[in-house]
Each structure stands twice: as C-alpha cells, then as structure tokens.
Amino acid sequence: MEEKITALGRHLPAAALIVGVAILGLIATQILRRWILRSIRAQERLQLDRRKQAITLVEISAWALSVIIVGAAVLMLLSEFGINIAPLLASAGVVGLAVGLGAQTLAKDLIGGLFVLVENQYTVGDTIRVGTLSGEVERLTLRTTCIRDGNGQLHIIPNGEVRIVSNLTKEWSVAFVDVRVALEEDLDRVIQVLGEFVDAFAQDPNFASQLLEAPKVLGPTPLNEWAVNVRVTVKTQPGKQDVITRELQKRVLVVCEREGIALPYPRHEVWVRNIEPQDKGSETVQ
C-alpha cells in the first residue's frame, strides 16, 4: 500500500505539470482568439463578408485547438501513470472505423460544414433561409448551423441537411414596399408623388449611408379588382433591408395621407332589387 502511495506521489508532480500546461494552453488559445478577432474587426478596409468568414474560421480553429490540447493532455496523463496507450489508440482506431461506417450522417454533416466554410456560403451574422426556417446565423460549426428566428427561437440544423440555402444578406439586400392605391386615382400623379418622396428619403442623413443605390418607383405591377400596385424598391447594405422597409412603410402612409392619395381596402358592392309580388285574382268558391 505504501509503495502504491509512494509511486503515486512520484507521478503527481508530472501530472500537475501536464494539467498546468494544458490549462495554460487553453488560456493562451482564448487570448490569441480574442486578439485575432479584435484585429479582424478593426480592419475597416476588409469587406464585410470576408470579415465574417475570417471570424467564423477563427472561432472554429480555436475550438479545434482546444479539443486537441485536452485530448493530448489526457493521453499524456494516462501514459504518465503507466497505462499503455498504444492498445488504447489501436482500439480507438478500430472503434472509430466501426463508428465511421455506421455514422455516415455525421460524416455528411462534417463535409457539408467544411464546404460551407470553404465556399463562404454564409457566416456568423448572416441572415439565411433554409427550407421553411429563416433567421440570423448565431453559431456555425463543422457539424451544425444555429439560426435564431424573429421570434427568438434557436434552430439547430445539421449541415448535411442544408441542401438549398438562401443568404438574405450576401453583399447587398433589397428593401421594397408595395403601395396599393385605388383604381380611381391618377396613376401618373401617384408615381410623381412617390418619386419625389424617395428622392427626399435618399437624402436623409439617418438612412443615406445604408443605401447603395437611389430608390426607384416601379409601376404599375399586376392589377386586381380593387387596387393598382406601385412598388418602391431600393438596394441596401447587407442586413439593413428590414430597417429601411419599416421606415419606408411608415413614411409612405404619411405622404399618401398628406397628398390625399386613397389607399383602398377590399370591398364588395351588393345590389338589392325589390321585386313587387304580382297581384293574383281572388278565387271564388261556390
């Protein structure tokens, strides 16, 4: 018993050194990660999509390096306490092969995540749509993509399931507002009023920096039985389309009310005919 305690005492300094080095490695990894992220965010000349891609790659690299440090520390500790890790590594390889043959879905997810990163399909901070789900990419790893929708729900999507993805904030976005006016309105006047409105909006210092092109008024678009549609559209900075759309909608209502442009609503006209009953001669019963 004393011999075991003595042997354990001989291994404790080395084990403590291994654990200490591992902890220092993890701390150094996090410090290096934060420094690199701070440097990337400070590069104003770097394009936004490239900056997001670099941030995503740094996050994944830091995670992978942390896993390697912890794994190496565990193996060194086992070796220090006299546990032969060669059979363990061999068995791990066999088990890994068996798991790999039966875990094709995991391999598909990892490969899918690798292509997402290499091809820069989307990065953390982008707004994407995958199938029926849409939201902002909050976290991206080799296996999963985490997006948070407008309701605050976090959706975790395996990268192998991402077949068709729509990136709503890639390089630029589009904001548009459909203005439906009554059929009785003078369409030329409506287009002129909206044209003056969008020209003034483009000069607004609060929103001019978020616009990439001058707003346009398109119309008329397809008619229906109760209104004519005129579309206001503008190209915006990535991710700014929702803010611009809300502001355009608010201001369009004010402009239409000020200029007396009627915004219609679905209605039905019902005609009622009053049909007088025909007089019938009285029958005499004898």
Image (cartoon, helix red, strand yellow):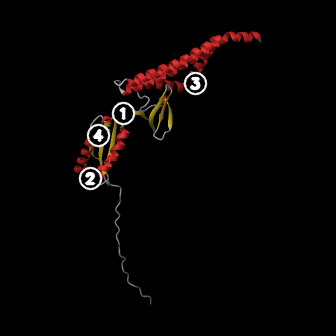
| Residue ID for mark 3 | 102
Residue type (three-letter) at the residue carrying disc 3: Gly
Judge whether 174 appears above or below 83 on screen.
below
| Residue ID for mark 4 | 204
Residue type (three-letter) at the residue carrying disc 1: Pro
Q: Is residue 37 visible?
A: yes
Label 1 secondary element: loop
| Residue ID for mark 1 | 238
Give yes or no for contact between labels 4 and 2 (Cβ–Cβ under 8 Å): no
Horizontal and vertical percent position of residue 89: 61, 14
Residue type (three-letter) at the residue carrying disc 4: Asp
Measure the C-alpha gap from mark 2 to mark 3.
68 Å
Count numbered badges in the picture: 4
Q: Nearer the viewer, mark 1 or mark 4?
A: 4
| Residue ID for mark 2 | 259
Give yes or no for contact between labels 1 and 2 (Cβ–Cβ under 8 Å): no
Q: Earlier in the sequence, mark 4 or mark 3?
A: 3
Answer few, some or many: residues within 10 Å of disc 4's Cα (few below 14, many 20 plus, some between 14 and 19): few
Measure the C-alpha gap from mark 1 to mark 2.
33 Å
Answer few, some or many: residues within 10 Å of disc 1's Cα (few below 14, many 20 plus, some between 14 and 19): many
Label 4 secondary element: loop
